[in-house]
């Protein structure tokens, strides 16, 4: 009878002490990162300002996520706007959107500007905390924080409804937890690292780069005995791949496909390095100069990061430091994107695809800038070098400000590009479809060259026109005896058949004409 109350009191005491410790640690973290918090607020305000007219940008990918989130909330599982299983992307991001909608009881398109602003703020604050660990050069930390907050690259991501908004936060969390693991090598931190990686992999298929980065660093570590290294390698791999494995099995049982139809790449590796270098040029100072040589820009950057990684491994220099983790991810992610874009066909390498390594790249560069500064013995030369770096930083910030100002003016006048742009908001055809939905409730299937837009504005489910590269899907479409076709003149998608190509195999009877499109009823010729 005495032991129970005594144990209870001890438990309360330990909980109280634990709360005090956690609170003290949080206050200490906040106190040393007031500058990070201020930068985070600047970034959040920028996202809200950029999305003030029309909300966040909505692309076709956004519609897949939105429709899957709506389907989950309606208790129908993961299905998309054409009533097909959601298999093109992993399940975690639509699950995240569904959770946000469930908590706040509002549609995700209304919540998205604030959700994205918060995610951007978190990524900036985490970046500042990592930079605080990385080096003690405050002047460089402030420049980098402003560069992150004002980055046109990141603002493009955080003003759209894309899974990269969450993935970038997960990448930073991976770097943070990875540092903790390589400091302690405990099973607990390994499982936390593997869990973070698993959720990142389930957010984007490109999350495989985090699996590869973590596995590479574990294998190359010299501070852990061989048997334990192999054990941790397999534990990490199994946990990190667990969620995506379940996801892929589910996809296969529903559609006999793991990630949907994928086409073979048509762009050479050299061309992809060129596109890669062009994106890097946009990130760097003196863009006008470096963009003239995109291939060399990309190649030199890749070789430099590779040389740094190999040199530090051979010389046994701080294998488990944050800058090494960041450099490893930058290298692995870059190589993955270049090779996957070469062997698989998707959009040309652009800022959206490369943005997840923008911040890790800054971590790597910042470390070496400070390291080079400390190697200089003469104070006058050291101060001159620091001054030069500040000038470079100022040029970069000015370049970012000019780009942001131009983008803000465009967004303020017509909204962010995509289906939330004014051309779509005030579409004559969409206005009609919102008012009269009778064509969706006939016995005929409905197709459109902008099915994503029709779903976004009406909530009605309809079919996608097949891509011309998929002969089997095109054959099925050509055999349809009759259907409704909603055609938009302002939608340009070279992957699907043109209106003239549809007319070659179908008799199209005009049902309704608009300023920006038509509604047809088709029949076989």
Image (cartoon, rainbow, N blue to C red):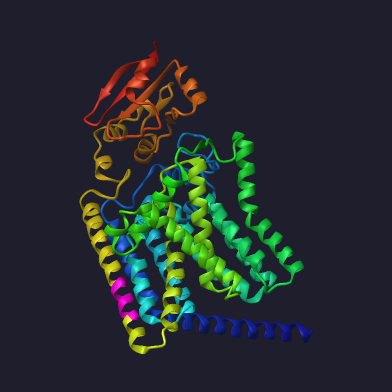
Residue 112 x, y percent position in the rendering: 38, 55
Nearer to me, 171 or 7: 171
Query: Residue at (21%, 30%) from the top-left corner?
Result: 515
Q: Which span of residues is magenta-colored? A: 385-393
Nearer to me, 332 or 347: 332
Q: Taking 288 as reference, is 379 above or below it?
A: below
Residue 169 x, y percent position in the rendering: 47, 63
Q: Say whether residue 504 is magenta.
A: no
Compared across the picture, whether 304 is left or right of 288 comes to right
Q: Taking 360 as reference, is 18 above or below it?
A: below
Residue 480 x, y percent position in the rendering: 46, 18
Q: In the displayed orientation, state which residue is furthest to the right.
A: 1
Query: Residue at (54%, 37%) from the top-left corner?
Result: 260
Instruction: Give the total of numbered labels.
Output: 0
Nearer to me, 57 or 319: 319
Query: Residue at (61%, 36%) from the top-left corner?
Result: 254
């Amino acid at each position: 009878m005495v032991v129970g109350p005594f144990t209870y009191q001890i438990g309360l005491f330990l909980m109280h002490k634990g709360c005090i410790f956690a609170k003290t640690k949080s206050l200490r973290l906040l106190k040393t990162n007031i500058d990070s918090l201020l930068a985070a607020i600047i970034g959040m305000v920028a996202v809200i300002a950029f999305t003030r007219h029309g909300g966040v940008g909505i692309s076709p990918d956004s519609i897949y996520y939105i429709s899957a989130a709506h389907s989950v909330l309606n208790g129908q599982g993961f299905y998309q706007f054409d009533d097909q299983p959601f298999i093109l992307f992993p399940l975690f991001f639509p699950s995240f959107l569904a959770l946000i909608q469930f908590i706040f009881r509002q549609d995700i398109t209304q919540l998205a500007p604030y959700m994205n602003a918060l995610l951007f703020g978190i990524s900036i604050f985490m970046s500042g905390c990592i930079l605080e660990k990385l080096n003690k050069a405050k002047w460089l930390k402030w420049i980098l924080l402003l560069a992150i907050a004002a980055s046109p690259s990141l603002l493009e991501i955080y003003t759209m409804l894309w899974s990269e908004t969450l993935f970038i936060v997960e990448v930073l969390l991976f770097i943070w937890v990875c540092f903790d693991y390589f400091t302690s090598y405990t099973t607990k931190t390994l499982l936390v690292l593997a869990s973070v990686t698993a959720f990142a992999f389930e957010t984007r298929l490109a999350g495989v780069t985090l699996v590869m980065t973590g596995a590479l660093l574990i294998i190359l570590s010299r501070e852990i005995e061989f048997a334990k290294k192999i054990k941790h390698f397999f534990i990490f791999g199994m946990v990190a791949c667990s969620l995506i494995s379940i996801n892929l099995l589910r996809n296969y049982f529903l559609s006999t496909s793991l990630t949907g139809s994928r086409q073979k790449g048509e762009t050479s590796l050299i061309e992809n390095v060129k596109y890669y270098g062009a994106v890097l040029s946009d990130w760097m100072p003196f863009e006008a100069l470096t963009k003239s040589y995109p291939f060399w820009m990309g190649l030199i950057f890749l070789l430099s990061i590779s040389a740094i990684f190999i040199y530090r491994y051979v010389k046994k220099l701080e294998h488990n430091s944050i800058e090494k983790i960041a450099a490893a991810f930058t290298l692995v992610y870059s190589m993955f994107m270049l090779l996957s874009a070469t062997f698989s066909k998707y959009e040309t390498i652009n800022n959206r695809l490369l943005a997840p390594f923008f911040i890790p790249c800054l971590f790597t560069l910042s470390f070496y800038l400070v390291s080079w500064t400390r190697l200089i013995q003469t104070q006058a030369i050291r101060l001159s070098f620091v001054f030069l770096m500040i000038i470079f930083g100022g040029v970069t910030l000015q370049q970012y400000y000019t780009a942001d100002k131009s983008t803000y003016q465009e967004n303020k006048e017509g909204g962010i590009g995509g289906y939330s742009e004014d051309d779509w908001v005030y579409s004559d055809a969409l206005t009609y479809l919102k008012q009269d939905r009778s064509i969706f409730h006939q016995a005929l299937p409905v197709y459109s060259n902008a099915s994503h837009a029709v779903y976004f504005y009406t909530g009605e489910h309809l079919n996608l026109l097949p891509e011309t590269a998929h002969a089997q899907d095109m054959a099925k479409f050509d055999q349809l005896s009759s259907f409704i076709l909603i055609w938009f003149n302002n939608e340009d998608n070279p992957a699907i058949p043109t209106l003239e190509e549809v007319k070659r195999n179908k008799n199209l009877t005009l049902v309704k004409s608009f300023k920006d499109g038509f509604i047809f009823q088709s029949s076989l010729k």
